[in-house]
Amino acid sequence: MKAIRIHEKGTIDNVNIEELPKPEIKPNQVLIKVKACGINPVDWKSTVYGYFEMPYTVGTDISGIIEAIGNEVTDYKIGDEIIGSLEWAKQGAFADYVATETKYISLKPKNLSFEEAAAVPLAALTAWQGLFDKLNVQAGQKVLIQAAAGGVGLFAVQFAKWKGAHVVGVASAKNEAFLKSLGVDAIIDYKTADFSKITADFDAVFDSMASSEQTIPLLKKGGNYVTITAKPSEDLVQKQGVTATHFLFHSDAEQLKTIANLIEQNHVKVFIDKQFKLTEAKDALKYQHEGRSRGKNVLVV
């Protein structure tokens, strides 16, 4: 089978297509014929900075069809269409086949294509966990979401609106109409806004752009800030009288099932920016690195 592999960190150009044997499954695993892979920022960053033990197959997000099951697996059957975010330390998504434990997968939303479905796991779980596990966002609260038109941001604004929050998105002006069509209440254009002049009346900030110096001062006293990038300074947090949390998402099949149900009920839409073939993974990672996508980028296997 084909797999997108890297043996040495330092540059995206170190990524190569290799031929590997089809994985053999353990009794508690399923074999998945991968149909598409979601691309996330960590995928290019790990090739440059070496987050994972080398060599490894790049990628964490998949959609596909179960082709074989181990004799201990009772919750899935051959032919099931699934999505998942694979075991973090091992990665392994960008390949024709994947072997995984079922705790990393959930049934694919029936109303999505495989390409759309592959865009869901990491980004949607990050948004869900940030908003509800860390920020504890409630109906009626005012929430600021950074990079609102990005992969995580688009899920975050839709989840927050579903919950009943008042959502302000930070994005470029070109995405204003698009975001308002999703229910976003107001847009801050990061290219022109003077954050120091914005009223400090937010209950929560979801930061994916290392913007703590700009966004923490927008919180009310006692407000909550969460970041998936750089940690804020402790001095700033104490000065503003807020709570700040830094977190890394974790794969969670039950949360993914809840998200899939919201997608099937049309509460949440999935947006694809660009699709690439598996063999174009190097170009896809470079495009992801540019960081100007509206929604998610996907590899089609």
Image (spheres, grey):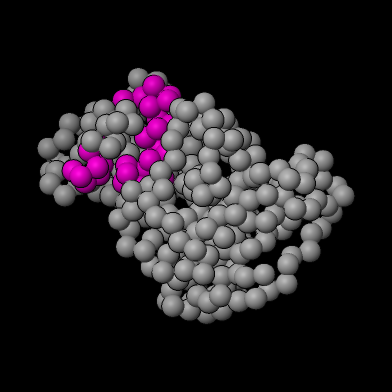
Q: Which residues are magenta?
A: 147-176
- Please state which of residues 269 and 155 is positioned toward the viewer in this rendering: 269
Q: Is residue 103 left or right of residue 62?
A: right
Q: Is residue 155 magenta?
A: yes
Q: Position of residue 73 (x, y in %)?
A: 81, 45
Q: Position of residue 86 (x, y in %)?
A: 62, 54
Q: Is residue 197 above or below residue 24?
A: above
Point 33% across, 53% down: residue: 293
Q: Quadrant of residue 291?
A: bottom left
Q: Quarter of the image containing the C terminus?
A: bottom right
- Please state which of residues 126 and 136 is positioned toward the viewer in this rendering: 126
Q: Is residue 87 magenta?
A: no
Point 50% across, 54% down: residue: 38
| Residue closest to the far right | 71
Q: Position of residue 218 (x, y in %)?
A: 24, 36
Q: Position of residue 53 (x, y in %)?
A: 59, 71
Q: Is residue 164 left or right of residue 219?
A: right
Q: Is residue 158 above or below residue 12?
A: above
Q: Is residue 152 left or right of residue 175?
A: right
